[in-house]
Amino acid sequence: MTGATNMLVIVLDALREDAVGASLEEPGRCVRAETCVATAPWTLPSCTSLLTGVDAGVHRHFWHSGDLAVPGLVEALPRGMRKVGLVNNTVLQPSSQLDAGFDKWRYFADHARPFERAASLIRRARRRTPLFLLLHSNISHDYYKPSGGVYFDEAFPDNAGGACTLGGRVIRWNRTTPEQRAAVVETYRASARKVVACAREVLELARARDDFVSVVLSDHGEGLDYDDARVHHGGRLHDDLLRVPLYFDLPSGTPARQSADLAARLASAPVATTDVLPTLFALAGVDPVPHVDGRRMDTAPGERTVVSEDRRYLYLKDRFRLNVRGRDTHMSPEDREQNQRLQEQLAGPPLVRSYRSSRAKLIMTCLHLRPTAGPPSEARRGLVEFGERLLGSPTLALYGDHLVAFEWYDLGADPGEHDNLLAGAGAGVRALAQSEWAPSVTVPVDGRAGGAEMDLTTFLEGAEAVSSP
């Protein structure tokens, strides 16, 4: 049984951790995570991880096709609790299968309606029927649409009309001037300011009742760096996409020790978005908390390595984003043709995976080409040519018809993740084999569901190092 109180989860889509400011914090009741890491760099797999507590590499819910094989955590909530989801992104419509366990799940195209409906539900919540409310907003995600110009004018009235809304150019930022790119960043910041203000209004209603345990977070960040080809989202795993804001807002009746333990944990080590609902359930009095990949933040021991993954998208260094089995949204005819041509070369979707600790991050990009009738040297050349198009300066390793590109960053010395420590092919592979990652990292050598993985040391022993591009 449970003594569960009301719960509010606010998901602000595509909101970078550095775009929030201090406007959500409330001394004495609001606890902020120093480092929260999303398990995927775009909405569908990341929200799946949030609502199931399962890592993206485990649930592999990167497409709407097929059944979601893991249950949603809301299904574990007690009978008598009302469970409502209000979402604002088309990929979260019922075809996402994330509505399982909810009494009501509504998609709104209009950005204002989810907030209005959430405010009404919070005001009318009754103690005898506790409420679990998921509120999702796409305001910051849609900065590239005309609404971004409205938010810009609201935020910067002295510069009204100065927004740059990219529209269909959002994936590559193509045909933009330096001045336009600077305006894009400011348009995003204005949209972020708007969504945070809307979230604050709803949060204040829950605070006034003092019987809600609330959490505010994002599912992923947003790329705003044209020069380094780090734009939009999906297809790469740098911290501008994975490091997201996370705030817990606690009612005054929360035991002081529990609040202190949570604050200490959130300040000391990375946490994952899979940890959010298990922690929220515990704070709200749900017992027992389901056992999933995510864990309670207030009681979890020690250091945490967070694993993130994408299998649908892959960004290349010319800002082209490969989209596997997608609808080719915002792609030109030339981009669609290139997208089809690259998919025809691959035996399965590309896989991008990262391992992040408090101090460092390892990123692997794994490619598997289709068999060809030509000689092995031709297949090898095809892999290397594909690898040379990858972002950054990864160290490349060949293993049969697989290519794995490695990046290793010291997050303390290089928080922007620009200096790959694995410089040089042979030296890089040797350094990786002797690194902190060797005991715990596995490398996919079969892209199929449930496919084989090899421990990093064994993979490197059998791999051929290739000079970095």
Image: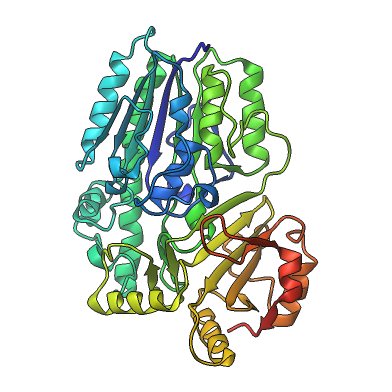
Which of the 4 quarters of the picture holds residue 267? Answer: top right
Inspect this view and state whether residue 219 appears: no
Q: Quick check: 42 left or right of 277?
A: left
In terms of depth relative to the viewer, which is nearer, 376 or 465? 376
Q: Which residue occupies 29% across, 46% down?
A: 89
The number of callouts visible is 0
Residue 247's x, y, as percent? 50, 34
In terms of depth relative to the viewer, which is nearer, 225 or 355? 355
Q: Is residue 226 above or below residue 159?
A: below
Q: Which residue occupies 28% across, 24% down?
A: 119
Q: Is residue 19 above or below residue 234?
A: above
Residue 441's x, y, as percent? 69, 58
Residue 145's x, y, as percent? 23, 56
Inspect this view and state whether residue 129 appears: yes
In terms of depth relative to the viewer, which is nearer, 85 or 255? 85
Q: Which residue occupies 76% across, 73% down?
A: 461
Q: Farthest residue in the right direction?
A: 434
Residue 269's x, y, as percent? 66, 42
Q: Farthest residue in the top direction?
A: 128
Q: Farthest residue in the front direction?
A: 373
Instruction: Identify the image quadrant of the C terminus.
Output: bottom right
Q: Quick check: 252 left or right of 118?
A: right
